Amino acid sequence: MHTDTERCVRAVRSKDARFDGWFFTAVLTTGIYCRPSCPVVPPKPGNMVFHPSAAACQQAGFRACKRCRPDTSPGSPEWNHRADAVARAMRLIADGVVDREGVPGLAARLGYSTRQVERQLLAELGAGPLALARAQRARTARLLIETTDLPMAQIAFAAGFSSVRTFNDTVREVYALAPGELRTRAPKQALRGTPGTLSLRLPFRAPLNPDNLFGHLAATAVPGVEEWRDGAYRRTLRLPYGHGVVALTPRPDHIACRLTLGDPRDLTVAISRCRRLLDLDADPVAVDEQLRTDPVLAPLVGRAPGRRVPRTVDAAEFAVRAVLGQQVSTAAARTHAARLVTAHGTPVDDPEGGLTHLFPSPGALAALDPEALALPRTRRTTLTTLVRRLADGDLHLGADSDWSETRARLLALPGFGPWTADVIAMRALGDPDAFLPTDLGVRRAARELGLPSTPAALTARAAAWRPWRAYAVQYLWATDNHPVNFLPT
């Protein structure tokens, strides 16, 4: 979008928050860059230059606006609904792969050479993977500076910098303030005295309907791993350097996030996974406009716009839970998952009590005795085959997965039908066009709304909803009186 100057100027003049994260405005006369919704008086069009990423602005020598704080914009929805190499690279960078494995590690995961990855990112985002990762480190550093009382040296390494000097230079260059000055300017009530605990605000594009989003997570919560308490969804997180506990509370203009981390180096990854879990980088206006063109869906969208797809923080975990949920009720699936957690999960300490384990990893489940599973024999075979393939690395599920290829690999496993493969694609891999024509709730809603109820006919009818069929599923599910559709009280 940043190449359409006229459209960008209109968005800046109208201060349209829907475009935050789509592009950034660099002002030639001041040397700063802003989000489109910046509240200051818009500059003259001749003084504005538009960039596709904050990293591109920083590489061009611009510093972040202190008023609108463009580093806190929601992420671009482009990386949510695209499956090409650039989108997969951006999802991996957000998950901290460059900081942990470097650019060669990123390229290896994508199946390209480092030169190809750098060329593609530079062409589309105006910055290479190192610059994009550097911009992310700067955001993380600012967050730690303003919301914790950690020493600056610890913040430097927790944010992913290789040295304190690089940390100091980057913060000064990006924010035109020294780290100590950033902390001095931060609201005093934001500072937290409890080591490892942070309170954050996760932004999103309005509207956001929390009912089915948090309702689904709460209704399917696995005891010991997840819970709904005091208006917040809480769960444990398996992270690269340790474990964490997160509490997510819906607010009118943001998601309140309280994170307890065993290692502060996991902050960037934890935030990325929480945003992915709640689908916070989606563009609800684009989704709802497309679905409103269908006269059957239009009333559903009009009554409760902004539905998101409830996703996951761990794709392998969700795949296991999807198999456990085959042809059984939500309560039965929770019971089966809870037994696995008790027998094979990793115990953790929860400062607030209530959560006891991390969901077992594929490696831990690969060693289980199939006879110990209270499942039909065919389901045992399905589960053990899945966890063995995940543990061996023969099957990879993650932010960098190719949606079509992974769906085909899942369908090749014994006991995997279209429903299981597509629900994993929708909620674990993040495919916004995944569709569940055989799902009982979808077929029931289709009959009530006068839509075709057979899978083939419904799939043909749903072609008009592409590329947002996963969101259409949320609206169809919402016609039922199931607890997944209601915000818990």
Image (cartoon, rainbow, N blue to C red):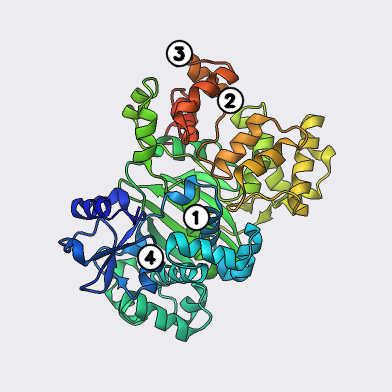
Q: Is residue 354 left or right of residue 295?
A: right
Position of residue 114 relative to residue 443, above or below, is: below
Q: Is residue 40 left or right of residue 278?
A: left
Q: Of tags 2 and 1, which is closer to the observer?
A: 2
Disc 2 secondary structure class = loop
Of pointers 3 and 2, the one earlier in the residue sequence: 2
Disc 3 secondary structure class = loop
How far is the residue under mark 4 from the one under mark 3? 47 Å
Q: Which residue is mark 2?
A: 439
Number of residue marks: 4
Q: Which residue is mark 3?
A: 450
Of pointers 3 and 1, the one earlier in the residue sequence: 1
Q: Of tags 4 and 3, which is closer to the observer?
A: 4
Disc 4 secondary structure class = helix
Q: Of tags 4 and 2, which is closer to the observer?
A: 4
96 or 369, nearer to the observer: 96
How far is the residue under mark 3 from the one under mark 1? 41 Å
Q: Which residue is mark 4?
A: 54
Of pointers 4 and 1, the one earlier in the residue sequence: 4
User: What amino acid does circle 1 point to?
Assistant: Val
Of pointers 4 and 3, the one earlier in the residue sequence: 4
Q: Which residue is mark 1?
A: 246
Q: Is residue 110 visible?
A: yes
